[in-house]
Amino acid sequence: MDKKPSEVITEFLNYLEAAKNEYEEAYASAGAEDRKAQTFLHDLEFAPNKGERNKVATRFQKSRQARRKAKDRAQLYEYINNFYTDKQNQHFLKSLRRLQNEQITREKYLFGNREFKNRVE
């Protein structure tokens, strides 16, 4: 036995939580890059010369590339996040956490220090 059943359940629950956090961070990051777009457009509009416009355009391009990476990361975890946050699945997740706790208790008993106490002398 490589892993105890409780460890597998724990890893799955931790993965769902981590995926939810990753989705939220990526979504927020993509939104932040989106909000920069208008600023870059104004900077391009009011740039005094070609060199300044080129610098702004390069920053704008890098911002759009960062936005694309963040958006792709968000899409990668979108379905997992939707599953984890769906109200219908909350009962299942609570049952899984309860199973995890019961399994940990059982494993402590089975793999812990067990001793037999005579009931009759």
Image (spheres, grey):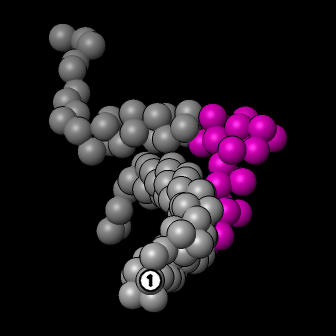
Rendering coords of residue 10 (x, y %): 44, 49
Find out whether residue 85 is within the magenta segment: yes
Q: Nearer the viewer, residue 62 or 39?
A: 39
Q: Amino acid at mark 1?
A: Asn
**Nearer to the camera, 87 or 101:** 87
How far across and how far down the image is residue 64, in percent? Answer: 55, 77
Crowd band around label 1 with a 10 angstrom C-alpha radius: few (<14), some (14–19), many (20+): few
Q: Nearer the viewer, residue 21 or 105?
A: 21
Read off the magenta span. Answer: 73-96
Coordinates of residue 57 in the picture (x, y in percent): 49, 82
Q: Position of residue 49 (x, y in %)?
A: 44, 83
Placement of 106 over or under 81, stated as above or below: above
Which residue sits at x=75%, y=44%?
Answer: 86
State which quadrant residue 105 falls in. top left
Q: Is residue 63 among the parts visible in the rendering? A: yes
Residue at 65% x, 70% y: name it: 75
Q: Main secondary structure of the magenta part?
A: helix
Residue placed under numbered mark 1 in the picture: 49
